[in-house]
Structure formats: structure tokens, C-alpha cells
Amino acid sequence: MKLGPVIPVLRMFDVGKAREFYLGFLGFAVDWEHRFEDGMPLYMQISRTGCALHLSEHHGDACPGAAVRIAIDDIDALHAELLARHCGYGRPGVETMPWGLRELKAHDPFGNRLIFYTEA
């Protein structure tokens, strides 16, 4: 038996703000979108270099306030990229944790946290 990759489902409440944060600020791209019909909640997959996330407006899919840990091989490059965007979502820093990892935390507009991490 082999398990596949984990794809977190994160709750969103405003598609425009989600696009601004995940696509504009973090640099993800939309893989696909689904609505059962016009005016219904959006469910979509976004990805960036092998990391996929699902974002959902559906009430029962997820609770806001989740935390997702994402391994990254060059946290300094991501940090520089985010700072260069001068976005209103903050200026996350890179912190060395006592357990030997370096982390960059980004908070989306819906209370979810994305924690990018690498070995110190």
C-alpha cells in the first residue's frame, strides 16, 4: 500500500481576496475551479512547484484557522520574493526555531496559516 500526497482543504470567504493572497502574493497558480452552477460556492485547486492546496467557499468543507506546514528547499528565495512584492498582507520574516528548522509564516485573509519550513 502506498499513500499519495496530502492536499489540504482551506476555507475561503472571498474569492477576490483569496486570489490576491494565494496567486498575487504567494505566487500559486489556479489548476482548476468548480461550481455546481452560477452563484454557488467555488472550490478550486491551486499549486506551486509541486505543492497543491484546495480552497473552498463551501460551508462544510473546512474551518477557518487551519495551519498547514509546507517544506521548501530555499526559504530565503521565497522570503526575498514576498518582500519584493510589497503586499499589504504583511512582511513575513524567517525565524530559526529551537528544534532546528527555519520557518516563514504567512497568514491568509481568512485566518489560515501557511508555515513554510526548511532545515536550519
Image (cartoon, rainbow, N blue to C red):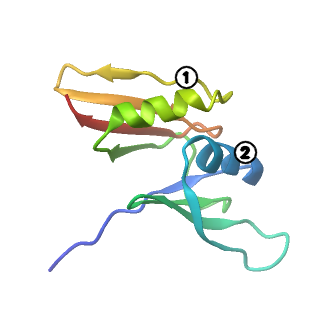
Residue that numbered label 1 is attached to: 91
Q: How many marks can you see? A: 2
Query: Mark 2 — residue?
Result: 17
- Distance of mark 2 from mark 1, alpha carbons? 17 Å
Q: Residue at x 62, y 50 (%)?
A: 23
> Which mark, residue 20?
none
Left or right: 84, with 100 as reference point:
right
74 or 8, nearer to the observer: 74
Residue 26, quarter of the rendered image: top right
Coordinates of residue 62 in the picture (x, y in percent): 54, 55
Whole-percent x, y for residue 114 in the image: 45, 40
Write down the quadrant of residue 40 in the picture: bottom right
Amino acid identity at mark 2? Lys
Please give the name of the residue rendered at 34% of the width and 62% of the height, measured from the top-left corner: 6
The disc, 2 or 1, on the residue closer to the chain's N-terminal end is 2
Q: Residue at x 35, y 46 (%)?
A: 70
Vertical arrangement, residue 64 with respect to residue 60, above or below = above
